[in-house]
Image (cartoon, rainbow, N blue to C red):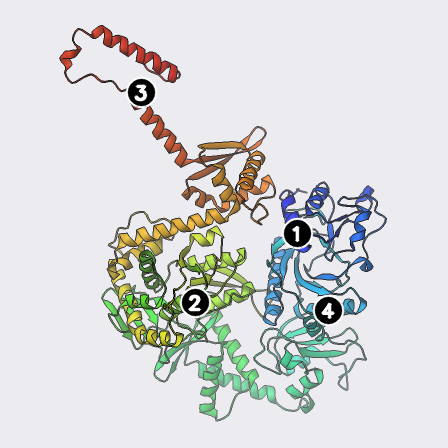
């Protein structure tokens, strides 16, 4: 059996995890149960560094655990900041001072005693993110996300007493989460309610079973951790605990003449099951749509059959808190019995609906969603077949013919048939939001009005098209754009934004034009500046010009799925008043900027993946720089806004009144400039473009079309990129330390561990924070951190290489600027040293030949002394 080696132990990762979980004065227990001849190994720690040193020797040999909740301080005397073999006493619930963390453990379903596959682990992490996002939408704070190495952990900050009532509450809450979120592939562990429950020590290896290629041993670790986690209240726990149905009592609701089959009953009454799974010895059925409120389509409604045969039903939403099995039976007409031929009637209704829908053009997009192009009052609209507006159109068509309304089950059946037809026979077509490119190379801009008009843009100019190609889809938040006036004047936009620097004003106008170009990467617009610098106003202006929406400024969502939904449903998404951006969200914004595909587990199934592809414009603002991630900053256009002075503030109502008057000419000017850029695009020769090359080339053409100058645009853009690169190097502790280390040095080289020590010295001397999560805690992590800032260091004139040496890997830094200085100095020094003055008149040298030769010999001697290895032959 092949041994699969996991990445080496990193004490720094353990230190960071422990510091996140415990406050400075708190004490935790580390425990290694059943460590062979060593018995139970245990120790109590208030020093994270001592803890990390102590467990290093055991990593990979045995599973290592930690108490999540702080223990009584006096227990430190059992084994203070050290590990003891054959420990006689370990932590019990009575030793816990207070509950600080609620652990939700999601484990992939697999045989016991073995590690998970990569796919199983990813399913657990994805389900954890879905859970956090769903609960976040219901008011829960953002949790920390961790991995045990095999599954996923959600860690919610709590502040609860350690008593029996709280234990019972936590037990019920975990049971409710199990009911609500467990699937056939991922199980929520409801047995972790004990206050002294242990969790994996994050940063250590989880050696479960043998390590194989398919099921390798992996490290546990924190993945995402809010800097200041909100506290989950007791009331919120009680709210989730209330949904746990009572499984007591006798089996009930059985029909005479035989047992009650819940599966048949669900099918008879047209209730669509999103998924079913074993639960607590019985079975749960999660419904696609709540029978009491059809707007609840988030897997909130359920039916449970207990092991005893008892049945319960409910919905997790507050508005349905009074609903139960009895009200469900009333809702679906259970008492009316099987004599009503509803199913036959609804099948006929479904056939009619399918026939009526045949007048629409049915397509499937590249990710498998089904759309219909329908004719409505003289114009065409593109509607999702499973969407609300298509459903209303279909009901209207049915009512116009039958003068009655179809049943919900018939509507669902019709939609399912249309989707199946699209899956196995419809033409595939790409649909766009706000901007699109047609097959003939022309661009279209969706005006978002009720007649579905668009602006057609070609090199000959922009014009309004009353019946454009059916290429656009719309979201509910999208709003109508002001009808543009041509040729317009884009520079009017500068009257409404606080950009004082001429380069920034140029870049902003070009940015607005390039946002209208479909199918290219767009830089992320990042604004920062003091309060009162009108950052939000600039974002709103940008949104109104490019992609008007009912909600112009968004708050950054807690969950990954919500962020994907926001990016998918908007062409330009703007996030206001941000403080910090996590690495995972930063990566998503990078994908949105340059274009990418994201795999999300479908909402109603656990077996299928849905791949969402998008390329979007994104804008953010904050008082400080909201991100320090190099990949995102490399894709950003950054403006620092100055605070408005006295007398510069305007009444908001008047500002927007004036803007709305100017908006038609601003939008018209942007579209006219885009037309000019299309004419010039293939003719311009901007030279070397660097990163975001498509944006730079279109920007050059747009600047020429605006009369601002392509070369001037490139100079301003390169200066903006240079300032961005400086921000990356300054904010990333590794990059900052390398730059300080290499100040005045041509080259530094040594073993990786030695170079890390040199970097630590440079960091200490220059007050660079080595407690930052990006600082490598061990030499084997340094190369990973260097890769993150490789291109930024190169832009700063510093390169590095890692090669194998006889005793290990050798890291070499080179400062190209210092090397050039040295070469220039050597070159100029050599020229001065060998310069000879032969005089103005060659005749003056006559008769002095011997003296001249003597001088040359002296020069040769000096050369040999200075450069003994130089070949002078």
Q: Which quadrant of the figure contains the C terminus?
A: top left
**Element under disc 2:** helix
**Disc 3 residue crowd, few under 14, some 14–19, many 20+, Cα 10 Å:** few
Percent of width and height locating residue 413: 54, 80
**Element under disc 4:** helix
Q: Which residue is mark 2?
A: 536
* Structural distance between the alpha carbons of marks 3 and 1: 61 Å
User: With 504 as the anchor, is 85 left or right in this view?
Assistant: right
User: With 452 as the anchor, is 5 left or right in this view?
Assistant: right
**Element under disc 1:** helix
Q: Residue 324's quadrant in the figure?
A: bottom right
Residue pictured at 66% horizontal, 46% vertical? 212
Asked if residue 512 is positioned above or below residue 785 in the image, the reply reads below
Q: Which residue is mark 1?
A: 19
Asked if residue 808 is positioned above or below residue 121 in the image, the reply reads above
* Structural distance between the alpha carbons of marks 3 and 2: 63 Å
Q: Which quadrant of the figure contains the N terminus?
A: top right
Q: Are marks 3 and 1 in contact (CB under 8 Å)?
A: no
Q: Which residue is mark 3?
A: 833
Whichever of labels 2 and 4 marks the residue nearer the N terminus, that label is 4
Q: Residue furthest right?
A: 88
Percent of width and height locating residue 740: 48, 39
Nearer the camera: disc 3 or disc 4: 3
* Structural distance between the alpha carbons of marks 2 and 4: 44 Å
Whichever of labels 1 and 2 marks the residue nearer the N terminus, that label is 1
In front: 284, or 263?
Answer: 284
Residue 60 in sight here: no
Q: Which mark is residue 175?
A: 4
Q: Are marks 1 and 2 in contact (CB under 8 Å)?
A: no
**Disc 2 residue crowd, few under 14, some 14–19, many 20+, Cα 10 Å:** many
Whichever of labels 3 and 4 marks the residue nearer the N terminus, that label is 4
């Amino acid at each position: 059996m092949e041994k699969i080696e996991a990445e080496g132990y990193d004490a720094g990762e353990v230190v960071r995890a422990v510091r996140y979980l415990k406050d400075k004065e708190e004490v935790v227990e580390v425990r290694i149960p059943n460590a062979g001849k060593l018995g139970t190994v245990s120790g109590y720690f208030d020093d994270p560094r001592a803890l990390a040193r102590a467990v290093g020797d055991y990593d990979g040999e045995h599973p290592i655990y930690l108490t999540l909740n702080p223990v009584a301080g006096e227990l430190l005397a059992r084994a203070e900041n050290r590990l003891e073999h054959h420990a006689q006493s370990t932590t019990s619930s009575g030793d816990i001072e207070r509950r600080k963390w609620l652990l939700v453990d999601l484990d992939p379903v697999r045989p016991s005693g073995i590690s998970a596959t990569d796919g199983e682990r990813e399913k657990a992490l994805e389900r954890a993110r879905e859970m956090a996002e769903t609960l976040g939408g219901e008011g829960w704070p953002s949790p920390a996300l961790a991995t045990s190495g095999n599954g996923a952990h959600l860690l919610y900050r709590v502040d609860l007493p350690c008593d029996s009532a709280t234990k019972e509450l936590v037990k019920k809450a975990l049971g409710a989460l199990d009911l609500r979120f467990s699937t056939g592939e991922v199980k929520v562990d409801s047995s972790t309610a004990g206050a002294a429950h242990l969790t994996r020590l994050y940063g250590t290896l989880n050696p479960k079973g043998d390590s194989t290629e398919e099921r390798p041993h992996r490290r546990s670790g924190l993945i995402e951790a809010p800097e200041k986690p909100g506290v989950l209240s007791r009331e919120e726990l009680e709210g989730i605990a209330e949904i746990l149905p009572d499984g007591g009592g006798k089996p009930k609701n059985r029909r005479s003449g035989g047992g009650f089959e819940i599966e048949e009953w669900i099918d008879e009454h047209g209730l669509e099951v999103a998924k079913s799974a074993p639960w607590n010895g019985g079975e749960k059925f999660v419904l696609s749509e709540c029978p009491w409120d059809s707007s609840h389509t988030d897997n909130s409604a359920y039916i449970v059959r207990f092991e005893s045969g008892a049945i319960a039903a409910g919905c997790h939403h507050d508005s349905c808190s009074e609903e139960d099995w009895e009200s469900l039976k009333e809702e679906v007409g259970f008492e009316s019995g099987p004599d009503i031929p509803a199913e036959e009637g609804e099948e006929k209704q479904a056939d009619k609906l399918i026939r009526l829908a045949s007048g629409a053009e049915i397509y499937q997009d590249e990710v498998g969603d089904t759309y219909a192009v329908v004719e409505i009052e003289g114009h065409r609209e593109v509607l999702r077949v499973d969407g609300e507006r298509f459903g209303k159109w279909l009901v209207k068509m049915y009512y116009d013919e039958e003068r009655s309304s179809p049943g919900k089950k018939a509507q669902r059946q019709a939609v399912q048939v249309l989707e199946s037809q699209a899956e196995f026979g419809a033409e595939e077509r790409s649909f766009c939001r706000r901007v699109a490119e047609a097959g003939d190379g022309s661009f279209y801009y969706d005006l978002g009005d009720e007649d579905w008009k668009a602006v057609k843009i070609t090199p000959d100019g922009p014009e309004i098209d009353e019946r454009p190609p059916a290429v656009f889809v719309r979201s509910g938040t999208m709003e109508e754009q002001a009808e543009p006036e041509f040729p317009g004047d884009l520079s009017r936009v500068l009257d409404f934004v606080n950009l004082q620097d001429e380069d920034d004003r140029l870049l902003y106008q070009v940015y607005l034009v390039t946002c209208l170009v479909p199918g290219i990467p767009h830089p992320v617009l990042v604004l920062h500046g003091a309060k009162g610098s009108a950052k939000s106003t600039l974002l709103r202006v940008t949104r109104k010009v490019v992609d008007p929406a009912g909600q112009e400024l968004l708050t950054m969502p807690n969950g990954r799925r919500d962020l994907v939904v926001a990016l998918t449903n908007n062409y330009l998404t703007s996030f206001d008043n941000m403080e910090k951006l996590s690495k995972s969200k930063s990566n998503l914004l990078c994908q949105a900027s340059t274009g990418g595909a994201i795999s999300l587990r479908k909402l109603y199934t656990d077996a299928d993946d849905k791949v969402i592809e998008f390329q979007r414009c994104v804008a953010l603002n904050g008082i400080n720089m909201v991100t320090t991630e190099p990949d995102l900053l490399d894709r950003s256009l950054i403006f620092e806004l100055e605070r408005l002075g006295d007398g510069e503030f305007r009444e908001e109502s008047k500002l927007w009144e004036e803007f709305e008057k100017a908006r038609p000419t601003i939008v018209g000017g942007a579209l006219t400039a885009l037309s000019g850029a299309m004419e010039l695009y293939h003719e311009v020769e901007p030279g070397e473009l660097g990163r975001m090359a498509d944006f730079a080339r279109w920007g050059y053409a747009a600047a020429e079309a605006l009369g601002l100058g392509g070369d001037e645009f490139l100079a301003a853009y390169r200066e903006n990129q240079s300032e961005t690169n400086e921000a990356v190097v300054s904010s990333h502790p590794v990059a900052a330390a390398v730059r300080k280390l290499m100040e005045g040095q041509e080259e530094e080289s040594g073993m990786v561990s030695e170079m890390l020590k040199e970097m630590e010295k440079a960091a200490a001397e220059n007050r660079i924070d080595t407690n930052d999560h990006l600082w490598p805690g061990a030499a084997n992590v340094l190369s990973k951190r260097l890769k993150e800032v490789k291109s930024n260091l190169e832009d700063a004139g510093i390169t590095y290489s890692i090669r194998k040496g006889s005793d290990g890997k050798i890291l070499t830094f080179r400062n190209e600027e210092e090397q050039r200085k040295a070469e220039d100095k050597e070159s100029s020094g050599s020229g001065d040293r060998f310069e000879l003055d032969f005089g103005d008149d060659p005749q003056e040298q006559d008769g002095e030949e011997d003296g001249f030769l003597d001088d040359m010999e002296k020069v040769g001697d000096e050369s040999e002394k200075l450069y003994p290895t130089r070949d002078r032959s």
